[in-house]
């Protein structure tokens, strides 16, 4: 085996320039593919992270049919013991109960529709880091009777800490929910969508306001790893009891999952085209290498060299050319991507405005998921195997006598 | 004569030339087709936004742009609308009342944007009248009716003819409740629009708000989108106290998407060509090395090095252009077929609806792109020819003739 490797390596460098050109084409393709996929996957992770980590959680438990209707009438009673039992699952890291509704908030002549969420302040902060988003004033405490507003919302209402705002809404089973609540804190969110619509009450106060004692509309769960999602979900489903629905983030946001798939499909299509082009380049090189050596092959076979040995050497050559390029691509790509992974590129100007308009922070995040690197290696390796079919077929069918005379 | 020789030389090693020709053809046709798809998506986004909601030009007061309160309405809006209608090149002008509020049903409630419109005027500006899936479009004679998105209706658990309560703050900040009946349900390409928009009659809104007719927004549809700059400047000079904006100002993200797509795709095509550059260089290099003796010979009998170089450049250009010709032809054929049939992306419909993209996609490639691509191809060919060309001209005739490769 060692001898074959040695021979193959030497054969590669019989025409240095040609090998270098082919290898650099693979290098170029791999580097480009790495950067592109890392960027795409980074933004998907980021999109998922912003909705899952900042708000949604990996799994949510609702009353049956709540997610479609978002009605407070589909709220459920979840006892403290139940929450405890969810938390006792070793994979579950956070259990966050919430009572959510849409209300009208007004101060003076300004009125705005807002989403109000009754939260358990310490639990909410532990999962979403909400307390760190306080821009002015203070965070909520347990049994707090104050309200937190997003900066956009506060600006619209011209409300500051210490001012009072009026909440109008619909409570449990249609009762009118209205109250005058002091603003205790202003939250700054990176996304204008949240900034303009979110407001928070303490869970207890929200339950009182909406006349829903002990009730929550959702319980959000964070788990230790995405890989355990299906597993944990079925365990939680058994615990949750009747008249409830247990949904994963993919089920709650099918549009996000689909838009990621569509975008990813587009990226894969482009890389496929690039790899086809590169693949033909390798094929051309291999073809030339094979053709110009047909005499040599003829001699070797006629003096008794086994065809399979020749085939092994040529296949190795092909694989070496491609993997060499891929390897250098990785060596150059990994540090670059690692740097970009730690320092996402900030966007400015129109592009930044566009990202914000689509509800994303204006940065280009990168991913270091091992899958990206494995995928490129597998693709390049398969390209090499396909290209190696040519010398394989040529050598199998080679007639030594004819080859000697060519 | 050089041209003929160059052309014939390409076909001396058919297998080699065909491999590289196939690579060029596949790369370019694939590149053109994916460009078609991406540009088609961008156009779909822009057109859906203009057709569905934005229109070409919108007018607001400065105060409303800063703070969308009810009282920040356009003074003398009726006169302004009449004057705008008399301008040339206007397809439609629609005045809209815009209020944020809450839509409630017995089942639940949801935050919405209430848009009060004159049905006929709005239909001349946006395509909302044609997006009604169930029931019918608004009718001025049918008081207290609304149309809402199908998605919102599902959430509120309402059907056509169901009752819907809209609540919003009046001029003095007090909450106004109004009971409406759903005349129809619409479904557009945008999920967000369908979830958040309620259209009511402007007269009903005026009555509920009390007092004189209120218009917060005037939306203008031009007969031809290209006449936008002139229309903008004439409207701006006529109403200096109002904020007159094109859809590009209103939705900079769409403008950017539309502009960036072409650039991005040209960049992508350039990358494909760069990938091809390696293959072409290698092919030409081999072709030169095969003919070392031949080049030595022709140089020995007096062919100028310049002409040898020119011949290699010509060969490379011919090779690249033949491949590109086939590739472009293939790309255009695939494009024109899919432009007729459309590409069904309904598997991704929900995901696309976040961005307001139709699930039936018609790829499109701007004509300039072909020219830009042509320039890039020639540049690639020149780039690929340089190294093999230099290699050939550096040959020493005496040594080259004696080379037996």
Image (cartoon, coloured by chain):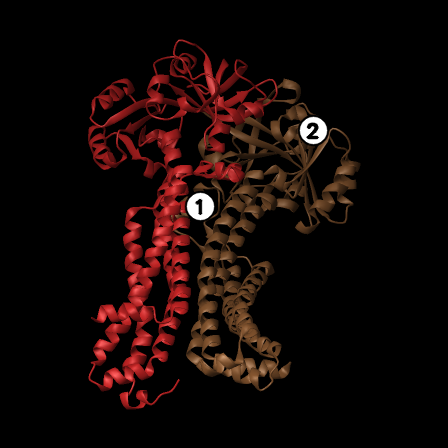
Chain colours: A brown, B red
Q: Can residue B260 be seen in this snapshot?
A: no
Instruction: Give the chain letter at badge 1.
Output: A
Q: Nearer the viewer, residue B171 or B255?
A: B255
Give the residue displayed 33% in from the left and 75% down from the top.
B387
Instruction: Tell me where residue B273 sits by quadrant.
Output: bottom left
Where does residue A157 sit, x and y in percent of width and height? 46, 30
Give the residue displayed 54% in from the left and 53% down from the top.
A41
Where does residue B218 sit, x and y in percent of width and height? 32, 25
> Residue B112 vs residue B261: left or right?
right
> Residue B72 vs residue A99: left or right?
left
Q: Is A233 located above or below residue B79 in the figure?
A: below
Q: Is B84 located above or below residue A266 in the figure?
A: above
Disc 2 marks which residue?
A64
Assess disc 1: are there few (<14), some (14-19) or many (≥20) residues with their C-alpha within 10 Å of its C-alpha.
some
Q: Secondary structure at mark 1?
A: helix
Disc 1 marks which residue?
A355
For marks 2 and 1, the one nearer the N-term is 2
Where does residue A156 sit, x and y in percent of width and height? 45, 32
Q: Which quarter of the rendering shows the N terminus of chain A?
A: bottom right
Q: Nearer the viewer, mark 2 or mark 1?
A: 2
Q: Which quarter of the rendering shows the C terminus of chain A?
A: bottom left
- Callout count: 2
Q: Can residue A53 be seen in this snapshot?
A: yes
Assess disc 2: are there few (<14), some (14-19) or many (≥20) residues with their C-alpha within 10 Å of its C-alpha.
some
């Amino acid at each position: 085996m060692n001898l074959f490797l040695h021979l193959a390596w030497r054969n590669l460098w019989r025409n240095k320039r040609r090998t270098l050109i082919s290898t650099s084409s693979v290098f170029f393709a791999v580097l480009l593919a790495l950067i592109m996929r890392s960027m795409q996957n980074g933004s998907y992770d980021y999109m998922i992270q912003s909705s899952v980590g900042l708000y949604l959680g990996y799994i949510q438990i609702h009353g049956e049919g709540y997610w479609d209707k978002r009605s407070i009438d589909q709220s459920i009673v979840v006892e403290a013991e139940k929450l405890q039992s969810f938390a006792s699952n070793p994979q579950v890291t956070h259990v966050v109960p919430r009572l959510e509704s849409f209300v009208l908030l007004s101060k003076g002549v300004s009125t705005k529709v807002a989403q109000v969420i009754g939260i358990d302040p310490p639990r909410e902060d532990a999962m979403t880091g909400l307390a760190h988003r306080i821009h002015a004033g203070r965070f909520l405490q347990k049994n707090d009777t104050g309200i937190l507003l997003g900066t956009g919302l506060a600006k619209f209402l011209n409300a500051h800490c210490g001012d009072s705002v009026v909440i109008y809404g619909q409570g449990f089973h249609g009762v009118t929910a209205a109250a005058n609540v002091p603003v205790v804190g202003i939250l700054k969110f990176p996304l204008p969508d949240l900034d303009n619509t979110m407001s928070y009450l303490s869970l207890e106060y929200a339950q009182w306001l909406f006349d829903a004692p002990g009730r929550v509309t959702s319980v959000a769960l964070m788990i230790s790893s995405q890989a355990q999602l299906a597993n944990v979900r079925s365990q939680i489903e058994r615990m949750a009891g009747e008249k409830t629905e247990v949904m994963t983030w993919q089920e709650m946001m099918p549009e996000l999952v689909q838009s990621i798939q569509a975008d990813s499909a587009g990226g894969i299509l482009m890389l496929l085209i690039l790899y086809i082009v590169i693949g033909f380049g390798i094929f051309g090189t291999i073809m030339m290498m094979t053709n110009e050596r047909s005499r040599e092959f003829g001699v070797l076979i006629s003096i008794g060299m086994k065809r399979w040995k020749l085939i092994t050497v040529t296949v190795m050559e092909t694989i070496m050319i491609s993997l060499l390029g891929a390897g250098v691509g990785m060596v150059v790509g990994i540090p670059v991507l690692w740097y970009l992974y730690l320092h996402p590129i900030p966007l400015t100007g129109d592009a930044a405005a566009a990202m914000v308009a689509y509800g994303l922070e204006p940065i280009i995040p990168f991913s270091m998921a091992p899958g990206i690197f494995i995928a490129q290696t597998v693709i390049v390796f398969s390209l090499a195997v396909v290209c190696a079919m040519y010398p394989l077929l040529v050598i199998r069918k080679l007639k030594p006598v004819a080859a000697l005379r060519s | 004569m050089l041209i003929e020789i160059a052309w014939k030389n390409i076909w001396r090693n058919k297998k080699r030339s065909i491999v590289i020709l196939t690579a060029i053809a596949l790369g370019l046709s694939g590149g053109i087709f994916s460009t078609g798809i991406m540009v088609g998506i961008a156009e779909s986004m822009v057109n859906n936004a203009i057709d569905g909601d934005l229109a070409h030009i919108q007018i607001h007061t400065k105060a409303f742009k800063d703070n969308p309160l009810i009282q920040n309405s356009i003074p003398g809006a009726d006169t302004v609308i009449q004057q705008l209608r008399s301008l040339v090149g206007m397809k439609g002008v629609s005045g809209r009342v815009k209020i944020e509020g809450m839509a409630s049903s017995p089942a639940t409630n949801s935050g919405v944007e209430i848009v009060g419109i004159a049905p006929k005027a709005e239909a001349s500006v946006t395509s909302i009248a044609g997006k009604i899936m169930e029931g019918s479009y608004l009718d001025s004679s049918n008081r207290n009716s609304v149309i809402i998105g199908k998605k919102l209706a599902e959430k509120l658990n309402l059907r056509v003819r169901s009752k819907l309560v809209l609540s919003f703050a009046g001029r003095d900040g007090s909450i106004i409740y109004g009971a409406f009946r759903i005349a129809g349900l619409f479904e557009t390409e945008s999920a967000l629009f369908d979830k958040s928009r309620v259209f009511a009659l402007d007269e009903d809104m005026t009555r509920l708000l009390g007092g004189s007719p209120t218009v917060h927004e005037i939306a203008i549809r031009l007969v031809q989108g290209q006449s936008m700059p002139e229309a903008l400047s004439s409207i701006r000079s006529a109403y200096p106290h109002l904020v007159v904006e094109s859809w590009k100002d209103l939705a900079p993200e769409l403008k950017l998407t539309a502009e960036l797509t072409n650039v991005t795709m040209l960049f992508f095509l350039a990358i494909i060509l760069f990938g091809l550059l390696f293959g072409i260089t290698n092919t030409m290099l081999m072709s030169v090395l095969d003919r070392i003796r031949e080049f030595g010979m022709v140089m020995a009998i007096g062919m100028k090095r310049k002409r040898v170089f020119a011949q290699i450049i010509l060969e490379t250009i011919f090779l690249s252009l033949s491949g590109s010709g086939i590739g472009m032809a293939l790309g255009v054929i695939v494009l024109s077929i899919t432009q007729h049939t459309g590409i069904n992306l309904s598997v991704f419909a929900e995901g696309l609806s976040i961005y307001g993209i139709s699930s039936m996609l018609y790829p499109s490639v701007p004509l300039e792109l072909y020219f830009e691509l042509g320039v890039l191809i020639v540049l690639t060919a020149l780039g690929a020819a340089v190294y093999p060309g230099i290699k050939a001209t550096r040959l020493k005739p005496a040594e080259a003739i004696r080379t037996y490769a």
